[in-house]
Amino acid sequence: MNFFSILVLAIVQGVCELLPVSSSAHVIMAEKLMGLDPTSPEMTLLLVMLHTGTMFAVIVYFWKSWKERYFVSGKIFWQFAKLVSVATVCTGVIGFTLMTLIEKVIFHCSAHAEIEHLFGNAYVIATGLALVGVMIIISAKHQSIDTSKNLGVRESAWIGIVQGICLPFRGFSRSGSTISTGLFLGLDKIRAEEFSFALAVVLTPAVIVKELLRLIKSQESSLSVANNFLSIAWPSLVGMLFSFVAGLLALRWLSQWLEHGRWHFFGYYCLCASVTVLIINHFLH
């Protein structure tokens, strides 16, 4: 994989990970167009670095507002931590249950690799994009102007449940669905956005660990994995930097559109992207 490919994937991941348009759908299609194998150890290591870059972008972008809103006292902080924990537990339970049902019941203990390939299926991606597009468009009409609406355990649980549903299905944008859910529940735009990305900071390390475990469990030898890491270490660090910068720009874009009544445009984009995925898949096959 050359430096140009790393740069393209870094920008795609950095922008699409934080916009409500599904990074996995865009990264998978970019990899297919460039003839790359997303299951290779090289790609796994690169994606770990790119996820790390976007996680730091979220922390840097929201740190000031989180500090002013949630770190003003120990009581407020622990209340917020409780809500994040409730949502994360709901995400884990729903996500793990869905994965178990898919792998153990529907596919009768098929190899995990086969499940991963299924989730990369263009029809699954297109369906996920279409569903989140509809959610975004409808939720745009429910954007609350009542900033007194509090984020409670009920709201946190529902947002966590929806986030859990997103985990197994590529194309079903995490940020798009969780922010939309917050708007459906009556939260104001800023609070829905802040809580969604607070959950992302908690979830991203788990995603990184999952990718690393998938790498370790691959058929490659430890020496081969080490050689792959050393060969792309510096390019991957550059990729992480680009994903960080792209992530910051994407968050600024998202905040402006969300706060200025343009949230629904992301929904229309997802619907167009859904059709585009099917067209690209048709010509690639």
Image (tube, helix red, strand yellow):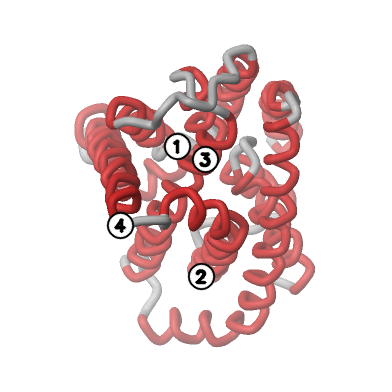
Residue at the location (34% across, 33% down)?
Answer: 156
First in residue order: circle 2 vs circle 3: 2
Is 5 left, or right, of 102 in this rendering? Answer: right
The residue identified by callout 3 is 120
Q: CA distance from mark 2 to mark 4?
A: 38 Å
The residue identified by callout 4 is 74
* Secondary structure state at the residue bearing disc 4: helix
First in residue order: circle 2 vs circle 1: 2
Quadrant of the snapshot with the N terminus? bottom right
Relative image position of residue 74 (x, y in whole percent)? 30, 57
Residue at the location (39% across, 67% down)?
Answer: 212
The answer to whether marks 2 and 3 mark residues whose Cβ atoms lie closer than 8 Å is: no
The residue identified by callout 2 is 45
Relative image position of residue 90 (x, y in whole percent)? 27, 36
Is 74 left, or right, of 41 in this rendering? Answer: left
Q: Which residue is situated farthest in the right direction here?
A: 4
The residue identified by callout 1 is 118
129 vs 121, nearest the viewer:
129
Q: Amino acid at mark 1?
A: Leu
Is 234 left, or right, of 175 in this rendering? Answer: right
Quadrant of the snapshot with the C terminus? top right
Q: CA distance from mark 2 to mark 3?
A: 18 Å
Q: Nearer the viewer, mark 2 or mark 3?
A: 2
Residue at the location (62% across, 36% down)?
Answer: 20
Q: Is residue 110 visible?
A: no
Q: Residues within 10 Å of mark 1 (few under 14, many from 20)?
A: some
Q: Residues within 10 Å of mark 2 (few under 14, many from 20)?
A: many
Q: Nearer the viewer, mark 1 or mark 4?
A: 4
